[in-house]
């Protein structure tokens, strides 16, 4: 029986095959889209994840509780019968969002969070917020009732370098907002910088962050080295290596303020492979395998459960999942599809640029 130097209790090794059993994970930031894309991508999330925070940036966006309920119906209709999966719905915050609608949706359990997109910051954010003062009444109401605000944290000021937009957002928007409404529960989505990690760590409460799989794996060179590689382009854009290392350290630390939000964001290939390609990386298929690779590399397989399955529900005030999944490390690399077919065309799957040896063995059923 082979041994590893630091073997967590839930890691088994026999005949040189390593297994890791953890509570079933959740995805705290997921784009499922709609129509043919929804049908094609949803089974890849519901195979591994029990729940996901569903991003509301459809066209038109999910702005009212009635929109969220209708979208939820479409998701449930697309769900494979054998899978159990709970979409946690969100509303897209606009300057016209009605605080009463938000409060009623939260009270009735129809929505789990509200999403702030600065107008123009990312995919389908045109209807987002231009003037944060205009949404103060909604945010104050959310603070009162304990409803989390998920934030795409980038400024849109064209004079700010694209690689600095997260750090500047913290300074100009998020810090002042949290000072004004300290009771507001905030999730900084897809943090990509050391500045973001440090800011989350410095907060005294009511602040957590999601980290994506791909930002733990690629730095900005992936987008540009040897040619322009549109399938590594997403927002916030990947940063320098020092930032990736800070994200990794946060993810594997076990710190309960950091948890998984894949930001799996499918776009049809022709919409990425063109002169002005869309931002977004589609990673739901191989996310758990890639994460096992990363955590193993960091000698921190014992922290994967906290990151993927425990910290998120704790912050959202939800119970952790009771079911478990088992990840198995194969001696030979495991083949994942390079792209997923949809009735509207292909969608390229995230390529981590290393051979993947891990696979999810026991998919929970029912
Ligand atoms: N992350 C991305 O690059 N894209 C997301 C939007 C977002 O999460 O900012 C999308 O909807 O495609
Ligand atoms: Zn975003
Ligand atoms: Zn996203």
Image (spheres, rainbow, N blue to C red):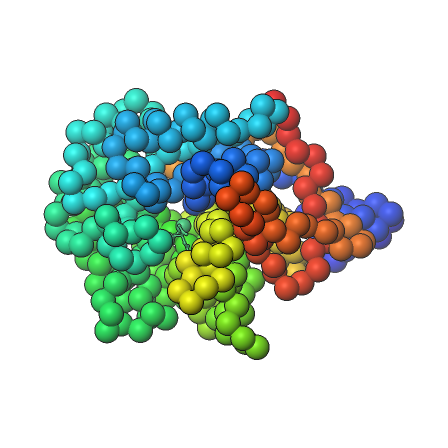
Residue 129 location (% of width, % of height): 21, 50
Which residue corresponds to the image point at 24% horizontal and 70% vertical from the top-left? 158
Above-or-below relation of 157 to 329 = below
Which residue corresponds to the image point at 15% horizontal and 40% vertical from the top-left? 96
In the shown orientation, is residue 310 left or right of residue 129?
right
Above-or-below relation of 254 to 363 = below
Residue 132 location (% of width, % of height): 17, 52
Residue 346 location (% of width, % of height): 56, 49
Residue 177 vs residue 102, the one in the foreground: 102
In the shown orientation, is residue 82 left or right of residue 97?
right
> Would you identify the image quadrant in which residue 295 lies?
bottom right
Residue 351 location (% of width, % of height): 61, 59
- Most extreme residue toward the bottom is 226
**Residue 255 in sight:** no
Which residue corresponds to the image point at 55% horizontal and 42% vertical from the top-left? 342
In the shown orientation, is residue 274 left or right of residue 205?
right
**Residue 224 in sight:** yes
> Would you identify the image quadrant in which residue 9 lies?
top right
In the shown orientation, is residue 174 left or right of residue 3?
left
Above-or-below relation of 228 to 308 = below
**Numbered-mark total:** 0
Screen quadrant of the C terminus: top right
């Amino acid at each position: 029986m082979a041994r590893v130097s630091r073997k967590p209790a839930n890691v088994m090794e026999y005949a040189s095959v390593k297994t890791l059993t953890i509570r079933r994970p959740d995805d705290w930031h997921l784009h499922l889209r709609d129509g043919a894309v929804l049908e094609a991508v949803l089974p890849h999330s519901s195979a591994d994840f029990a729940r996901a925070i569903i991003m509301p940036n459809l066209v038109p966006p999910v702005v009212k509780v009635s929109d969220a309920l209708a979208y939820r119906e479409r998701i449930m209709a697309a769900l494979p019968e054998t899978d159990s999966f709970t979409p946690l719905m969100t509303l897209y915050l606009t300057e016209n969002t009605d605080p009463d609608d938000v409060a009623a949706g939260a009270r009735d359990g129809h929505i789990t969070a509200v999403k702030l997109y600065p107008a123009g910051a990312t995919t389908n954010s045109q209807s987002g917020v231009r003037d944060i003062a205009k949404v103060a009444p909604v945010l104050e109401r959310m603070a009162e009732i304990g409803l989390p605000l998920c934030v795409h944290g980038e400024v849109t000021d064209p004079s700010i370098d694209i690689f600095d937009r997260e750090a500047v957002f913290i300074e100009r928007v998020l810090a002042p907002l949290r000072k004004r409404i300290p009771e507001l529960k905030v999730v900084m989505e897809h943090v990509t910088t050391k500045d973001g990690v440090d800011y989350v760590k410095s907060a005294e409460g009511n602040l957590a962050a999601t980290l994506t799989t791909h930002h733990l794996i690629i730095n900005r060179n992936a987008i540009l080295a040897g040619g322009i590689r549109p399938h590594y382009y997403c927002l916030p854009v990947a940063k320098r290596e020092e930032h990736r290392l800070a994200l990794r350290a946060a993810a594997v630390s076990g710190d309960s303020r950091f948890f998984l939000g894949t930001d799996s964001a499918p776009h049809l290939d022709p919409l990425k492979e063109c002169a002005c390609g869309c931002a977004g990386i589609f990673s739901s298929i191989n996310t758990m395998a890639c994460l096992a690779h990363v955590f193993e590399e960091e000698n921190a397989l014992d922290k994967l459960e906290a990151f993927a399955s425990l910290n998120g529900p704790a912050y959202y005030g939800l119970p952790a999942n009771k079911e478990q999944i088992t990840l198995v490390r194969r001696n030979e690399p495991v083949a994942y599809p390079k792209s997923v077919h949809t009735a509207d065309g292909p969608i390229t799957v995230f390529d981590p640029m290393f051979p993947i040896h891990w696979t999810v063995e026991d998919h929970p059923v029912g």
